[in-house]
Image: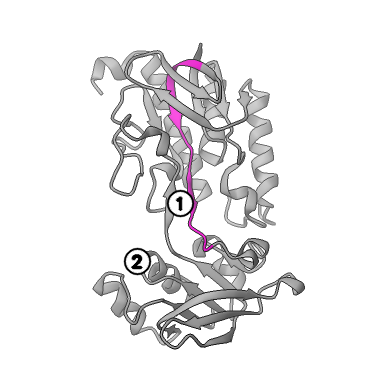
Amino acid sequence: MYDVTIIGSGPAGLTAAIYTCRSELKTLVIEGTAAGGQLMITSEVENFPGFPEGIEGPELMSKMRSQAERFGAEFKGGDVTGVKLESRPFEVTIGSETIETKTLIIASGAQSRWLGLEAEEKLRGKGVSACATCDGFFFTDREVAVIGGGDAAIEEATFLTRFARKVTIVHRRDELRAGKAMQKKALDNEKIAFEWNSVLEDILDVNENKVTAVVLKNVKTGESKELPVDGVFIAIGHDPSTSVFKGKIELDEKGYIVTKNITRTSVPGVFAAGDVQDTRYRQAITAAGSGCMAAIDALKFLEGEEVSAGW
């Protein structure tokens, strides 16, 4: 029996573990098969406070894990395959093993959607990114491409114009899907160009271990061409890791966990933190902050304060 079980081992989950363990709550962290979250595929993090020279994503996650472990957190690998949340204690199943827990913090994150190109995977962190806020600075006075035509793509492209010399939006249709106000903002920006009716066919150059160009295919003519760029931002959306919670707690239409008072879910005693419930910020520091909040809320719940105040 655990006081707190945390699903996820990214910044939100590990920060929550640090706080619950320092409050002397018996804590289990279920790491998942992709332990450490999305920062494990981030080459350099320059915007996390406390590291003026920057820090490699995997190193940052290793330090967070060691800190949680130092305070007594237990860790278990594997993915959650089932949950029982109808009554407390809750039950969480990992493969063939089921554990019981008095409270649950869901910090399972969200994954950027990728196109599935071989070069896309090999050059990830070497010019290929899914986060302009994280990596835009690295492309100061350079040319980049943004793949997508929805709100996310326009937000990424507009943000990148703060740094890049030129931003080319590549969209498979001949008009954007983003909101009208956002479309106008992009269309009026002299730094933004468009490649209409086009899809990303390949990214060059794996042999040079950096991005030098993209290969675009026109969906109407079938013709392919190279567009020289220094970076590629894939902006086709995110998928929250919540499939196991469908029908168990309230999710929005995109599958993100619905929370009130920042971390409370629709089930008393179940909290959510990080990208699994955050569709707006999606930063390591905001995930860590919400992990702290979820841990404090779980402690208050166990102490009875939240029960007496109503959920």
Q: Is residue 100 above or below residue 56?
A: above
**Furthest-right residue in this view:** 207
Q: Is residue 252 left or right of residue 164?
A: left
Instruction: For the C terminus, give its image quadrant.
Output: top left
Please give the count of numbered marks on the rendered protein: 2
Q: Is residue 207 above or below residue 277?
A: below
Residue wearing tag 2: 151
> Measured from the top left, where is residue 81 in percent x and y?
49, 29
From the viewer's side, name the closer residue of 193 and 79.
79
The image's mark for residue 238 is none
What kind of residue is marked 2? Asp
> Callout 2: helix, strand or loop?
helix
Read off the magenta span: 99-115
Image vertical order of residue 254 relative to residue 46, above or below: above
Q: Nearer the viewer, residue 240 or 70?
A: 240
Q: Magenta stretch mostly in which secondary structure?
A: strand
User: Which residue is label 1 attached to?
Assistant: 282
Question: Does 48 lie within the magenta span?
Answer: no
Residue 49 in view: no
Q: Residue at x 34, y 85 (%)?
A: 188
Residue shown at the point (28%, 30%) measured from the top left:
266
Can residue 215 be seen in the rendering of this structure?
A: yes
Which picture quadrant has residue 201? bottom right
